[in-house]
Amino acid sequence: VSLQHIYSQIGIVSTMESHKPGMFGLASLSEFADRASGVIGNETWEDDLDGLYRSYLHYRLAEQQYVPNNSGRTAAFRITRSPGGGQILQHEAEYYLVKNTQH
Amino acid sequence: LNTFLTLFGHIAFDVLFGWSLLTLRQNKRTLLETALAAVLVGMYAETGLAALLLYAGVSLSASGLITGAMMIVTGAAAYFFGGRHQPRFTWDNVKWFEWVSLLLIAETVLFSAWQLTRTPTYFADALQHWSGRARALYGGVNWSFAPHSPFFMGAQQGSNNYPLLVVVWRALAAELAGGWNDTVSRADGLIFFIVIVGTVWLAVRRFSGIRWLAAASAAVVATVPLHAWHAAAGYSDIAVEAFTVCALAAILRHEWFLAGILAAGSLWSKNDGLFLYLPGLLAAAALINWRKLGYFFAGLATISPWLIFNAFYGLGTTSGHSQLGWHSEAPRLMWKALVTSSTSSILWIGITVCVICCGSAMAANVPGRGLLAAFTISFAAILFVFSFSNSFEFLRDQTTFHRTMMQFSATAILIAAYGLSLRLDR
């Protein structure tokens, strides 16, 4: 049983190393978050993502001031899949960084 | 490289502090047993002290500096004015079956190290409750100790009633490394894995004196399939497992105060420690020597600042509302999870058979009775929680249940090995 697990782990390493970074469904969000982090700087941000995508975004941007959705305040930037109005500063895969106009 | 060097220095600091306290009194521990317990004692003391300062409104960096200074002063005082009862060092030539076990352990360590260096932090609970909150604490802007703040205890990242051992340790590790990265966010898992495997190996060697049984037990622990992931996942379950099995090993060495401290560390790692493992540890300590329970409780009392803080702010210990009620699908799902699922392989079949076959021998032996009670109570607590509470949903989706069984695996393997040692001794 142990040898079977070792064999499967070797397979995982081999597959991941040959396909990296495309193996992660979060790769595009990761690159987006890194670039968005530079744009947001010391300003504030908010988002409307959900599930694992929200968790991943909040982890990546945990050191930058977040504005909770129900706080009654508007952040300087919004991260969304549906940009609507506002100035789009960055777009990668399905993610948009939008400058909130009413801020 | 800088990250690994600072992490090594951080752990070495914790070990030195733990060592200075563990050698204050006469003891029968070996050098390796002392080192493994010292890792956990050091991490527990460091994060506990820093959390006290954080509750009082001191910044993370100041808390880290003050805690470090207090640990240096205490450690130096313990060394110069204490008993200086250094543990004994023994060395035996490594036998071939021990090499096999070491190779299996090394493979898991290598696989975990590969994950730490080549993959990002991506498991959901690590992103939220553990590394997510740790990074928020490190960053300072999305964390607050003010109860009315939306950021209270990292509430925007994850559950704010989860205890802080790995959260504070990772935040302080990032301070030392000069920044956050995905290695800092998960590396403690590998340390806990090594502590778990080493503790089981040495404990079985101590109580049985059978080298192949000790090596085999360590190999079984190392090859529990989920360990290879949890050593680098960034979750707290492996921390609960390390503190719990180390506490049980301390009980078997009759180190009651240390066992209490390590049980407290289990509670400080995740709330599971309080409900699932503390009752079993208490039963073991009581059945082995109830007269020493006071020492156990004295060590356990070191967790009281967190319990008081938690109670004062009404944080609670469960996520969401908790309703009790029987879930009729539970037995079928548990059978699937424990018997037919590949997640634990044949582990639980083997352990159950072992405990049943060795049950009578264990019941006739004082430590055996304690261990049998610990096994029964913890296993029953797990089955109860996942059959009668809202946690049933985590059995239904086959997620947290497997993690909980992993938390229990090292303790269960240690207990099964004790039973086997009694049978082999006849």
Image (spheres, coloured by chain):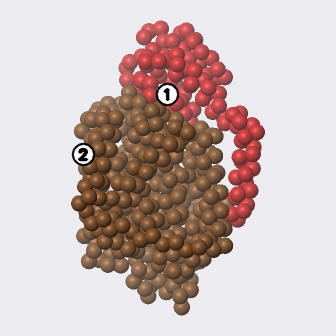
Chain colours: A red, B brown
- Tell me what residue is drawn at x 50 percent, y 53 percent: B191
- Name the chain under label 1: A
Find residue B303 and report its image quarter: bottom left
Closer to the camera, B238 or B202? B202
- Tell me what residue is drawn at x 60 percent, y 29 percent: A30
- Secondary structure of the residue carrying numbered label 1: loop
Q: Label 1: how many residues lie within 10 Å, few (<14), some (14-19) or many (20+)? A: many
Q: Amino acid at mark 2?
A: Phe
Closer to the camera, A89 or B246? B246
- Vertically, is A94 above or below B284? above
Q: Position of residue B394 (x, y in %)?
A: 53, 52
Residue A41 relative to residue B295: left or right: right
Residue B42 relative to residue B224: left or right: left
Q: Indicate which disc residue A61 carries.
A: 1
Residue B216 seen in render: no
Q: Position of residue B246 (x, y in %)?
A: 43, 64
Q: Position of residue B323 (x, y in %)?
A: 41, 53
- Tell me what residue is drawn at x 60 percent, y 54 percent: B109
- Vertically, is B249 above or below A42? below
Q: Indicate which disc residue B312 carries.
A: 2
- Tell me what residue is drawn at x 44 percent, y 9 percent: A102
Q: Are marks 1 and 2 on the same chain?
A: no
Q: Quadrant of the C terminus of chain B?
A: bottom right
- Name the chain under label 2: B
Closer to the camera, B338 or A38? A38
Estimate the spatial distance between the alpha carbons at disc 1 and disc 2, rounded to whole Å.
30 Å
Q: Position of residue B46 (x, y in %)?
A: 34, 48
The number of numbered discs placed on residues in the rendered structure image is 2
- Vertically, is A56 above or below B289? above
- Secondary structure of the residue carrying numbered label 2: helix
Find residue B30 and report its image quarter: bottom left
